[in-house]
Structures are given as structure tokens and as C-alpha cells.
Image (tube, rainbow, N blue to C red):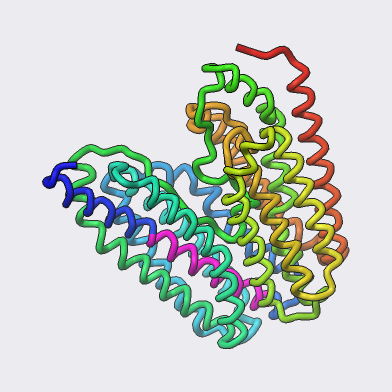
Amino acid sequence: MSLSSAPSVRATSRSFGALEAAGVLASMGDGILLVGLLAWSYSAREHATIIGALMGARLLPPLLLRPAAGLLRGRRALPVALTAQLLQGIALLPLLSVRSDNALPLVLQVVLLTAILAAFFQPSRKELLRVLPPVGHPAAEKAFANAGLLTLTVGPTAGTALYSTFGLQGTVVAALVTTLGSLGLLAAVGPSLLARGWRDGQTRIGGDGEMGAESCFLRPRDGAETTQDPGLSTQGRALRTQAPPPRTSGILRPAVALVTAGLPVAQVAFTVWGLFRSPEYVGLILAGQGLGMGMATLAYPWVGRRTAPGTLVPASLGIAASACFAFSLAGDLPAAVLPAVAIGFGLSLPTSGPHTLPGTHSREGLRSPLSAGLDVVTEAAGLLSVLAMGPLVDLLSPRLAMVLVSVILWVLALYAFGGVADEESLPDRV
């Protein structure tokens, strides 16, 4: 590397770090606020249906606004990202005055508005990453991916502590601080991106490390793509036939989202009626699931080399099914957190590497209309899950709802195993 290029590399690294840190901060605040909103709304009415409505308000805007957010290109991305973060901070201010359960309509309106703004912030930030050249990025991307996974544990845990001490207002203040921090990082890096990125015409794609508290139930891990064209070698053909066939994957992803995206709804009610704890302690359960997701990411390089990918999917779903059943039998908080870790591990492991639930068998497949359509269907299934889980929990009980989820996951695991067996019985395709 020449001396003249060193300042450019350092500037690029700083820009990349600032953009990724902005996403990590936003994710941290989202996890903290989620716990506060779940705990407050359940305390206000003690109906799981309210929890489902609140989570539905978080998930609906990204689904509906996906086409509009996808149009963000070039210089428009920076002002959109800055405006979204600024308005999100302003939108949170009314929550500081919430004192009684009569404010539930206001809380739902704020949640809906912040979800609309977040639906534009994350795509805009990813678009900004595209202008950065990939010099020195692999290690940085891995570090920030790990930091993003860490927020799934730290965020909900901090949310539990803040809500227990300061109530909803404590979690709102923390979300405001992280939002302003994210806004400041974007404002600091923005001018250099405008000066360098689009002038040079860069179109590189950066990484994305953060995920929301429900992410392992709703979408595959970013970057879950194949690293080898299956048609290039015998090994590639073997991997293709061992992986879940596209039809099986296309059914499994929405089906798993339909069954599991509503788990936090049941877990809030179970925390109160099954574990006899205050609803904010659901944050520790969500933190356990985040820890399980991180463990799955770390374990995949080792497990993936020793397990046929097509076998990994049903085995992972079986782990999640067993963990859901164990969760339903828990009698105290530590006994519930441990199965929660296994739930996050089981549901996240199939989306941590190539040839798994994404159902894409080439790099081009990740950009295909079929893959994009499957993402939309999966998100819609997740939205339906959180809306249906609330009435189901109120009608049955949190414990029975978790048992039902466990049974359905076992059925999906058997279906995945059968789908792989059917595929392997077919002649190899060139």
C-alpha cells in the first residue's frame, strides 16, 4: 500500500466504523425500548392481545414500506437517514409523559411512527455503506456483526434494569440517548461520504451486523449466501443435493416465522403468570435468545464443516422445538432463560450459513425476484404470528401456547427431514 493511499484507507475505515456504530447504537436503543414497551403495555391491561398489537405496529411499516425504502439511492440516502433518526428522537418525547394506562393509544401511535421512520433509516444506512471500498473491511465487518449480536443480549438486559428502576421513562431516555448518538455519528461521517463516495462512483456493499429482538424469527442472517457455485465441482453438487430443496426452503421459512415470531407475546404473559415475576423480566428471556443467536453464529463454522446442511435444518428445528417445550415447564426465571438460549440457537443456526433456510443456491439467487418475494412472505407471516399469538394466549394460556409452538416446530422438523430425503433420492443434476 502506498503512503498516498494510507489517508484514504484510514478515512474509509473511520466512515465504515461510524456507519456500523450508528446501526449498533440504534439496535441497542431498540432492544431497550422494546422491553419497556412490552412490560408497560402488559402491566396496563394484562392482555396478551395488547402485546401482539404493539409488536404488530412495529412490524407492519417495514413490510408495507419496503418498496419505497428500496428506492433510496445515491445522495438521497444520507438526508433520509439523518431525518429519520432526528424525527425518531422527537417521536419518542411524548412517551416521557406517560403515567397511566389511558395513554395506551398514544403509545401505540408512537410505536407505529417510530417503526415507519426505522423502515427508512436502516435501508438508507445500508445504501451509505455501498459507497465505501472494501479495503480492510472483512475483519471490521466481523467485529461489528459480533457487536450487533451482542446488542441482542445487552439491550434487553439493560431494558430490564432500567424499567425496574425508572419505569417506562427510563427506557425511553436510554432510547433517546442511543438515537441521538446514532444521529451524531451519521452527521459526522456524512460530508466525507458525499465528497468521496458518489464522486468516485463506488458501489461496494458493506455488512450489516444489527438485528432487532425478533429478527431470528423473521428473516435469514444477512450475508447467508453460498460461497461456491454448485455446478463447478462434485463437492458443489453434493452440497446442493444435501441442502433443503428450494420448495422445502420456500415453505419452511414462512412457516417457521408464522409459528415463532409471536413467541415474545407468549413469553411476556408466561413471565407474569408462569414465573410470577414482573413483566419487564421478559427482557432477560429475550437476552437469552439473543445469546443463543450469537452462539449459533460462532458455532456454524465448526458445525457446518461436520454436518450435512440439509440435516442441520431439521436438527436445529428439533432443538428449538424441545427448548420451547422445556420453556413451558419452567418454574423460575433461570430455568426459563436456559431454554430461551436454546430457542435462539435452534432458530438462528439454520440461517447462519450457506445452503440452509434462505433456499438460495447461488449468489445470483440472493438477488432474484423469487428471493425478494420470499422475504416479503416471511415478514408477512411473522406479522400474522404476533397478531394471532395474543388472542391464542388469552384463550388458552401462555404455557399451552408454548406447547403448541413446540409441537408445530417438531412437525416442521420432520417435514424438513423428509424434504431432504426426497431430494437426495433424485438423480444428481448438472
In the figure, residue 429 lies in which quadrant? top right
- The residue located at (61%, 61%) in the rendering is 290
Quadrant of the snapshot with the N terminus: top left
Total labels: the figure holds 0
Q: Is residue 331 visible?
A: yes
Could you tell me residue 150's position as x and y percent? 53, 62
63 left or right, relative to 330: left
Q: Is residue 46 magenta?
A: no
In the figure, residue 249 lies in which quadrant? top right
Could you tell me residue 338's position as x and y percent? 74, 65
In the figure, residue 414 lies in which quadrant? top right
The residue stretch that appears in magenta:
21-41
- The residue located at (63%, 26%) in the rendering is 239
In the current view of this chain or complex, which residue is farthest to the left?
Answer: 4
Q: Answer above or below: position of 341 versus 334.
A: above
Along the viewing direction, whichever of 212 and 52 lies nearer the viewer? 212
Q: Answer above or below: position of 64 versus 329.
A: above
82 left or right, relative to 310: left
- The residue located at (28%, 42%) in the rendering is 133
Could you tell me residue 343's position as x and y percent? 72, 56
Along the viewing direction, whichever of 93 and 149 lies nearer the viewer? 149
Q: Is residue 39 magenta?
A: yes
Q: Mainly helix, strand or loop, the magenta region?
A: helix
Q: Is residue 105 visible?
A: no
Could you tell me residue 209's position as x and y percent? 47, 53
Quadrant of the snapshot with the C terminus: top right
Along the viewing direction, whichever of 84 and 417 lies nearer the viewer? 417
